[in-house]
């Protein structure tokens, strides 16, 4: 069978910018036909081509676009996305994504055809969510991410997630920053000595709770010229247990200088 430009032998497998594979071939009608979806593995794309060639050889072929194909639902695609991203996200992030899918997104969109999702559906869903700003922003961001992948996979024409600032997290209550004097007073008011240094480091370093809880003696530097702590790990809570691991991003690995006035309090703490 003659091959068109870009074809090698019978059929063609092309790696797309999305890192997925597209399969196409020239059919008996002389036209180029593409698979209705792209493939994660090159082997799967080649398998689709082999199946199409068998149809031609057996005389059962018809253009792929004219065959009845079961509609791909958002729920099915979201599960596929979740499986394929296992190596991209930390366990804690995967736990959160699983929760957003199961409790916020899939109850509405699980059985909706992927190609049928539109802007109005997304707007109606978002407007119906309970008043939990951070959760809603994270769920919307996840929905948009999954649909962006579907767009890259050429399964949808546009991403229907177009609500302005829907992914922006808005605090319900603004945090109150203590002054240096208030931090020292709070530390002094702590009845248990072993927690006094924790309050001081938290107040003057700006570390997150998970970073504070994971600090070790080796992370503290107390010399004549330096007073600092190094963030090398963090604690997260997963399925009822505390797990120590690396921070979420490379930028979180850092050394934070502390006021030299804290040196004596930290030295006393390390001797406890």
Image: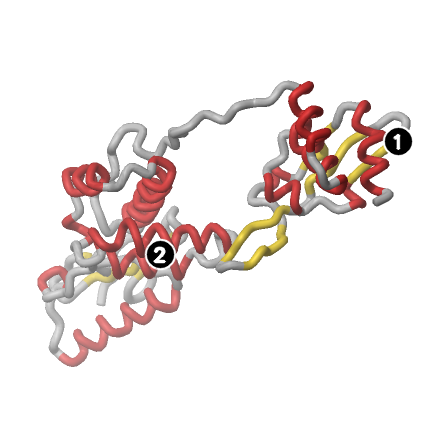
Against 253, is 4 above or below? Answer: below
Of labels 1 and 2, the one closer to you: 1
Please say whether residue 108 is visible from this viewpoint: yes
Furthest residue in direction right, as rendered: 224
Provide residue 69's location: percent of width, then percent of height.
Answer: 14, 65
Quarter of the picture holding the N terminus: bottom left
Q: How has the structure been colored for display?
A: secondary structure
Against 19, is 229 above or below? Answer: above
145 to the left or right of 4: right
Which of the 4 image quarters holds residue 72?
bottom left
Residue located at (18% from left, 75% from top): 55
Residue under pointer 2: 81
Instruction: Pick whichever, 269 or 95, lies toward us.
Output: 269
Residue under pointer 1: 223
Against 190, is 177 above or below? Answer: above
Residue located at (88% from left, 31% from top): 223
Quarter of the picture holding the C terminus: top right
Provide residue 228's location: percent of width, then percent of height.
Answer: 77, 32
Please say whether residue 33 is visible from this viewpoint: no
Q: Are marks 1 and 2 in contact (CB under 8 Å)?
A: no
Going from N to C along the chain, the mark reached first, 1 or 2, is 2
160 to the left or right of 171: left
Instruction: Pick whichever, 212 or 124, lies toward us.
Output: 212
Element under disc 1: loop
Residue count near mark 2 (Cα–Cα under 10 Å), binned few <14, some 14–19, many ≥20:
some
Residue count near mark 1 (Cα–Cα under 10 Å), binned few <14, some 14–19, many ≥20:
few
Provide residue 24's location: percent of width, then percent of height.
Answer: 26, 59
Q: Which mark is residue 35?
A: none
145 to the left or right of 268: left
Label 1 to label 2: alpha-carbon separation: 50 Å
Element under disc 2: helix
Provide residue 94's location: percent of width, then percent of height.
Answer: 45, 54
């Amino acid at each position: 069978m003659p091959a068109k430009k870009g074809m090698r032998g019978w059929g063609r497998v092309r790696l797309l910018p999305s890192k997925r594979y597209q399969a196409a071939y020239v059919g008996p009608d002389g036209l180029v036909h593409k698979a209705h979806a792209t493939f994660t593995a090159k082997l799967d794309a080649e398998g689709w081509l082999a199946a199409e060639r068998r149809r031609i050889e057996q005389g059962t072929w018809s253009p792929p676009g004219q065959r009845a194909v079961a509609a791909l639902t958002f729920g099915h695609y979201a599960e596929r996305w979740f499986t394929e991203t296992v190596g991209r996200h930390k366990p804690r992030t995967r736990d959160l994504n699983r929760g957003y899918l199961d409790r916020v997104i899939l109850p509405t969109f699980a059985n909706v055809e992927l190609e049928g999702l539109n802007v109005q559906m997304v707007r109606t869903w978002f407007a119906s969510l309970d008043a939990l700003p951070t959760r809603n922003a994270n769920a919307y961001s996840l929905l948009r991410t999954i649909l962006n992948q579907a767009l890259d996979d050429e399964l949808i024409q546009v991403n229907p997630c177009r609500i302005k600032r829907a992914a922006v997290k808005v605090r319900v209550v603004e945090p109150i920053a203590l002054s240096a004097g208030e931090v020292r007073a709070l530390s002094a008011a702590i009845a248990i000595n072993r927690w006094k240094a924790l309050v001081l480091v938290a107040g003057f370093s700006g570390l997150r709770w998970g970073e504070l809880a994971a600090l070790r003696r080796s992370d503290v530097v107390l010399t004549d010229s330096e007073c600092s702590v190094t963030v090398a790990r963090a604690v997260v809570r997963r399925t009822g247990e505390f797990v120590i691991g690396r921070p979420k991003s490379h930028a979180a690995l850092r050394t934070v200088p502390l006021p030299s006035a804290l040196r004596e309090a930290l030295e006393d703490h390390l001797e406890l």
